[in-house]
Image (cartoon, grey):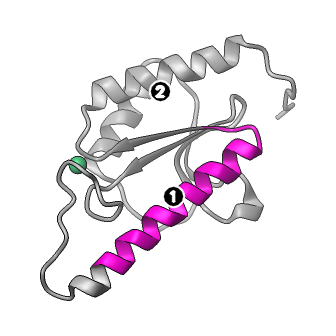
Amino acid sequence: MRATRRRDTALELAVRAQLEGRGNEFRVDAQPIPALGRRADVLFERERVAIYLDGCFWHGCPAHGTWPQANAEFWREKIRTNQARDRDSDRRLRDAGWTVLRYWEHEDASTVARDIHAVVAERASRGLSVQRSE
Ligand SMILES: [Zn+2]
């Protein structure tokens, strides 16, 4: 893991703590597909579930993503680029057999953790075609 993390939002920390409390094993800030070169915030490698906890500003949350007045063009472009990359990552991961879950920074940590736990448990119980030995 890198020494300097991209970010550790309150939601990330709270969700991770709750998942750990449920006995879930996962990786943090890891790449689901190395060739893709993009990290997921939380990763369940064996179950192939990649989780993204998107910041409301950087990813343009429809509820309260604000579009700055100053340098409006720059920020619009920046946020749109982020959104396009998010959609592209989602598509590539799903094509590779991953389940992708995205949540907004403003969402309730308990609800998010419960949702993630349910999806991971479902993936695990479904029986994975490819079992990894490590
Ligand atoms: Zn939001």
Secondary structure of the residue carrying tag 2 is helix
Residue in the image at 50% along x and 65% along y: 84
Relative placement, left or right, of 23 versus 78 is right
> Quick one: which residue is furthest to the top in this view?
125
Q: Residues within 10 Å of mark 1 (few under 14, many from 20)?
A: some
Residue 99 showing in the rendered view: yes
- Looking at the rendered structure, the kind of residue marked 2 is Ile
Q: In this view, does 93 lie above or below 127?
A: below
Q: Position of residue 11 (x, y in %)?
A: 29, 43
Residue 23 showing in the rendered view: no
Residue in the image at 36% along x and 70% along y: 79
Q: Is residue 121 above or below residue 38?
A: above
Measured Cα–Cα span from mark 2 to mark 1: 19 Å
Secondary structure of the residue carrying tag 1 is helix
**Is 114 within the magenta?**
no
Foreground tag (2 vs 1) = 1
Disc number for residue 116: 2
Residue 70: quadrant of the picture: bottom left
- Looking at marks 2 and 1 on the same chain, the residue that comes earlier in the sequence is marked by 1
Q: Where is residue 58 in the image (x, y as percent from the top left)?
A: 32, 65
Q: Is residue 119 above or below residue 83?
A: above
Q: Main secondary structure of the magenta part?
A: helix
Q: Which of 95 and 54 is in front in this view?
A: 95
Query: What are the residue bounds of the magenta stretch?
Result: 76-99
Q: How crowded is mark 2: few (under 14 residues within 10 Å), some or many (20 or more)?
A: many
Residue 99: quadrant of the picture: top right
> Quick one: which residue is furthest to the left in this view?
69
- Looking at the rendered structure, the kind of residue marked 1 is Asp
